[in-house]
Image (cartoon, rainbow, N blue to C red):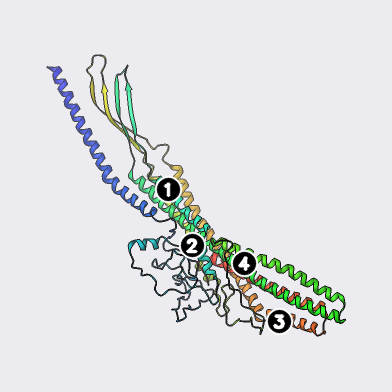
Amino acid sequence: MAKSFNLRQRAILVLLMKFLLKGSCLILLALIISVGLPICFFATRECLANSSYDNSHLDISGMKIAAGYPIQPAPLLPAPRLMVAPSTSSGNLQQSPTLVPTSIPDNSDLPLKTNKLEKSDQIPSNAPNRSGTKDEKRKEEVTIEYDTSLAPIRNQPGLSVVHAMNEALMNSPRAAAIRAELGITRANYAYASQGVNPVMFNDRSPVSEQVFRLGPTLPIDGPWKLLFRMLATKRLVEQTKIDLLTTLWRLRADVRRAYVEVVVAQETLKTLTELYDLSSKLLLVAQKRFHAGDVPELDFLKARLANSQNEVELGVGKKRVLRSYQQLNVIMGKSVDDSVNVPGLPGFIGKSADFHISAEKSEILPDFDRDVPAVSHFIDIAFDNRLELKSLDARLKVNSANLRNAYGNIIPTAYLTLGVSSSNNPTAGPKLTSFFYTLNAEMPMSNWHQGDIFTYKATAKQLHYQIGAQRNVVIGEVAGAYQNLIAQREKIRLYQDHVLSDSYQVARLARRSYEVGESDITSTLQAQQANVQIRGQYLDAVTSYAQAFTNLEQSSGLPLQ
């Protein structure tokens, strides 16, 4: 009777434990599902929202790499508003001012085109309606780094610097390689979604204990860990976008430098061609006077030597132009053999037919009708728009997300093993078959991720100092580029005012004086060489001005005009 009562008691206890354990498992499962599913859904939605775009979409809070000049001014800055004038009957656009820094437009509805640039600068009147289908809007959203609605300065036929930068940002393999790097960073979403795999548990002792256990070992990981990993990856992708925009911004500067090299090479070739024509004419005059007995043979030999030297320099100038064309084609993603039509600089040689200082404007030369703003104006713009400063801010957010992830990892991952247990119960039996469970959890006593926590805290402190250091670097770069630009601007002003014209007139009168026999060949050749030297110095000043302008634009973080 007592033995039967004990067996009944044991059976009731086993049933009660089964019920309690089953209820506990259900409660634990329900808790994991109720808390984990919403968090996993939110994290998955964030992952899909940040990974479904095309690799060419590099848009952070409205930031775009614009090859041309923005239409809207920078917010909270006293820069004047630049608006594209409506097309006239001839389709020409109003000329934009010079050296007026403005802000990249934050309006996401700006027309961003994926096709190649048209040969004309006119904005078509039959532009597509923005209220298109959802697929059309999606296609437009995944295109950035250029905005073909921005109007360049155009008063001459040919390739403008704005179109050259647009072509490079759209078609250059370098830009494509930069944009493709974003996909590598987005792959971290897949890493962030990885979790701990379950383990199959099998425990068998067929001889001694005659026990057989079989079941899965399930990891119980906090759902907040997945959320923190997803948010940290999102911050990292945003920082990567800014870094890639910084690289594209530098590529834009390389295109401008290649374009300036084409212009300067063309003007140098023009100068060398004019010098060669003058030396050829001078050689003919010296030859005639030598045959007539007016001058000694030495004058004829000097004229022939000067003409031969100019011929050699002319050949070198042609090769330089060809090399500059090829470099510009390569950086724009075109074939090296494609034709290039870049407008030249206006002439400044007095009353000749090439003198158009009042009628022509150039994207390379300064516009003296407008004053350059103060250096503090460009420093304020740089503080608001430098991508290096934005990248440091993004690194702070990444570090903060990693710190939260480190705090979340303090709570360890537990492992719950559930399964079937069968024992022969030696030596007398009977054989018992029931369930079993095992719970293993790490105790965070000596390792609570303190290394990561203190590292991220120290990194946050260093990044704040780094931001101050970067602002100091920005001030130095803007100030240096600004002073160089002002100096070269004044130098170009003097050359255009009277130096080029006076040099041209001196060389012309010296040649004329030799033709009528009032001067010797030496003074005539010296005057021609001085004229070429002055025009070479002028082109050096133009190159230095363009370099200073590019540096100021790069240090300001916005397209300038």
Residue sitting at 23 percent across and 39 percent down?
A: 27
Instruction: Give the mark toward the camera: 1 or 3.
Output: 3
Secondary structure of residue under mark 3: helix
When the figure is inspected, residue 272 is found, relative to residue 249, above or below; the finding is below
Q: Are marks 1 and 4 in contact (CB under 8 Å)?
A: no
Looking at the rendered structure, the secondary structure element under dot 2 is helix
Mark 4–mark 2 Cα distance, whole angstroms, equals 21 Å
Residue named by callout 4: 261
In the rendered structure, which amino acid carries the disc numbered 4? Glu
| Mark 3 closeness class: few <14, some 14–19, many ≥20 residues within 10 Å | some
Residue 557 seen in the current view: no
- Residue at label 1? 188
- Residue for badge 2: 170
Question: Residue visible at 51% across and 78% down?
Answer: 95
**Does 535 appear above or below 382?**
below
Determine whether, in the image, residue 421 is placed left or right of residue 411: left
Q: Nearer the viewer, mark 2 or mark 3?
A: 2
Of callouts 1 and 2, the N-terminal one:
2
Count neighbours of disc 1 (C-alpha within 10 A) and say few if under 14, some if 14 to 19, many if 20 or more: many
| Residue closest to the far top | 428
The one nearer the camera, 183 or 173, is 173
Residue 56 image point, x, y percent: 44, 58
Which disc, if any, is residue 27? Answer: none
Marks 1 and 4, how far apart at CA: 41 Å
Q: Is residue 13 above or below residue 333?
A: above
Mark-to-mark CA distance, 1 and 3: 66 Å
Q: Quadrant of the N terminus?
A: top left
**Quarter holding residue 54:** bottom left
Mark 2 or 3, nearer chain start? 2
Q: CA separation, marks 1 and 2?
A: 27 Å
Residue wearing tag 3:
502
